């Protein structure tokens, strides 16, 4: 068997190395020449993109368990500043789920760790080999993940620095931490927006000491360290788009900017935005902006959302000044102020850009011009109970003949506002927005219909028209939302469903448009 496998392995290796060059004459994608970016999906255990070869980076924080008690109701865990368990109470253990979103490779994963104790694994696993500091475990995470369980740890030398490496990456993970498939997927995109990677929505980070660090046990709690995001952008030659936490002080911003200045390839630009969707009442950052607006006497008392918009404008200007101080100027800086695409020019013009002359201190106005299709139980003409009995073609007809023209109208209107202030019009998020809302998401017939519409070849053709319309209206950078994620009743946001996919109508249309 060894004699027959070795030539086959050698042939596969040679093909993997040289076949792309032999069969494709096209040059390496030039990210700087393209005007499409991507919002990367969040770093959580149910992530289906698997950006890192060390899958433990996306594990949850340790969960305390005690036999005989409800799940997760063990005694409080004593952890160090990086999130590693320092000791376990007698009869208790700690565990954390990994790879729960599926779409990960089947094979022998290598678990490395430091310290003394015992690590076990949950369902869909079989330990192949074990020695101090190293475990080989066979995992089948195609449909569901497993648990990494800390059964024992020596308080004098506790287990820490746990890594769970995908098959084949034990020797290279330090120098090459990103999955090759992940890198290839987004090579050629102009910009990576890190809103979800930074855990922006509802962030608790205030001071620089609160930031995520490369040595943290997991990056699913605070988000990705700035060093990791910059490293990724350097590898892909893609511009970073950072969303600074809404509670962050000026010192946080300056120090963040200083790290970027020190590490980022000097040929790349930096997009800087204050938080994310401060206009959106569902997010903590909006409630914070409203409270600050009231405290500062901004906007009419009877319309606190206007005070929130004005605070957003003011704080954005402060963020930009602090960034310039830490970054050493504005030469490679794109100062972004973002607001809602719909609702007319009143908000972006009168509430944001004209307030305290904010328009003079920005470089780009950002909107999210989604193709909006949101059935709900009470929506006039789009009742979820009615739409659930439509055909896929009916859904796509509605998207193409009504949602698309409506969206183009928003683009045109907001482009005029941006031009008034000499700003670029960019999209912080974009794409289809087919999702039930206000109870519509719970319709068991609606969800599979909307997922089917997203998978239909015609969706790709609609995306092509949509992207062409953005360019035709003078739009600049557009960051699609989002990279890779599984569809559910909460939406079909990913261009792909999982890391094991190589194409879809949406993804293929975006890739084709990015090369034009």
Image: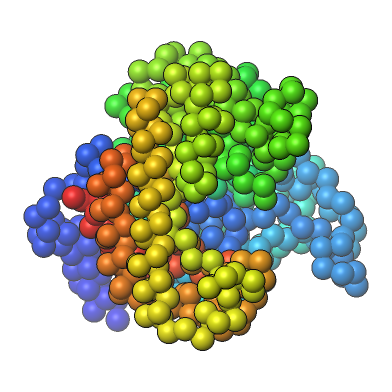
Residue 329 placement: quadrant: top left
The reply to whether residue 1 is visible in this rendering is yes
Q: Residue 339 or 329: which is nearer the viewer?
A: 339
Name the spot of residue 513 as percent of width and height, x first: 24, 54
Measured along the vertical axis of the image, is residue 194 above or below residue 442? Answer: above
Q: At 36% across and 58% down in the image, what residue appears?
A: 405
Residue 32 placement: quadrant: top left
Q: Residue 305 or 439: which is nearer the viewer?
A: 305
Q: Residue 307 or 512: which is nearer the viewer?
A: 307
Q: At 30% across and 81% down in the image, what residue appears?
A: 1
Measured along the vertical axis of the image, is residue 311 above or below residue 225? Answer: above
Q: How many marks?
A: 0
Q: At 18% across and 50% down in the image, what residue appears?
A: 516
Q: Residue 476 or 206: which is nearer the viewer?
A: 476
Measured along the vertical axis of the image, is residue 49 above or below residue 448? Answer: above
Name the spot of residue 422 as percent of width and height, x first: 35, 25
Q: At 70% across and 25% down in the image, what residue appears?
A: 298
């Amino acid at each position: 068997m060894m004699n027959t496998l070795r030539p086959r392995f050698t042939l596969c290796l040679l093909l993997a190395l040289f076949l792309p060059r032999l069969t494709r004459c096209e040059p390496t994608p030039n990210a700087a020449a393209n005007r499409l970016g991507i919002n990367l999906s969040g770093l959580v255990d149910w992530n289906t993109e698997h950006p890192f070869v060390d899958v433990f980076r996306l594990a949850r924080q340790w969960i305390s368990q005690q036999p005989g008690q409800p799940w997760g109701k063990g005694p409080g865990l004593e952890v160090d500043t990086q999130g590693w368990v320092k000791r376990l109470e007698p009869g208790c253990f700690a565990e954390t789920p990994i790879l729960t979103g599926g779409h990960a490779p089947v094979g022998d994963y290598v678990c490395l760790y430091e310290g003394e104790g015992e690590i076990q694994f949950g369902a869909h696993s079989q330990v192949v080999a074990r020695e101090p500091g190293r475990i080989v475990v066979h995992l089948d995470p195609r449909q569901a993940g497993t648990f990494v369980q800390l059964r024992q740890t020596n308080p004098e030398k506790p287990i820490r620095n746990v890594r769970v490496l995908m098959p084949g990456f034990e020797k290279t993970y330090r120098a090459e931490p990103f999955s090759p498939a992940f890198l290839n997927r987004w090579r050629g995109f102009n910009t990576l927006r890190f809103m979800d990677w930074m855990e922006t929505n509802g962030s608790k980070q205030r001071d620089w000491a609160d930031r995520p660090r490369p040595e943290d046990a997991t990056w699913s709690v605070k988000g990705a360290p700035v060093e990791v995001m910059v490293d990724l952008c350097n590898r892909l030659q893609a511009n970073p788009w950072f969303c600074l936490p809404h509670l962050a002080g000026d010192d946080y911003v300056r120090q963040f900017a200083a790290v970027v200045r020190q590490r980022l390839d000097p040929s790349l630009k930096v997009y800087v935005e204050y938080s994310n969707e401060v206009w959106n009442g569902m997010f903590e950052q909006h409630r914070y902006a409203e409270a600050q607006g009231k405290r500062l006497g901004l906007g009419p008392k009877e319309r606190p959302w206007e005070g929130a918009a004005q605070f957003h404008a003011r704080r954005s200007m402060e963020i930009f000044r602090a960034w310039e101080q830490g970054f050493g100027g504005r030469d490679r800086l794109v100062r972004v102020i973002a607001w809602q695409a719909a609702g007319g020019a009143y908000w972006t013009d009168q509430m944001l850009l004209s307030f305290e002359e904010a328009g003079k201190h920005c470089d780009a106005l950002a909107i999210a011009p989604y193709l909006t299709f949101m059935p709900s139980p009470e929506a006039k003409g789009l009742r979820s109970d009615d739409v659930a009995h439509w055909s896929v073609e009916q859904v796509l007809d509605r998207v193409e003949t009504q949602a698309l023209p409506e969206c183009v109208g928003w683009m045109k209107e907001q482009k005029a506002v941006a031009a008034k202030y000499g700003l670029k019009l960019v999209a912080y998020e974009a794409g289809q927005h087919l999702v039930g809302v206000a109870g519509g998401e719970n319709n068991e017939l609606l969800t599979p219909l909307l997922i089917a519409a997203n998978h239909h070849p015609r969706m790709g053709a609609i995306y092509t028209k949509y992207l062409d319309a953005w360019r035709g209206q003078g739009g600049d950078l557009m960051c699609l939302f989002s990279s890779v994620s599984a569809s559910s009743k909460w939406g079909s946001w990913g261009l792909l469903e999982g890391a094991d996919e190589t194409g879809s109508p949406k993804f293929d249309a975006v890739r084709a448009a990015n090369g034009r």
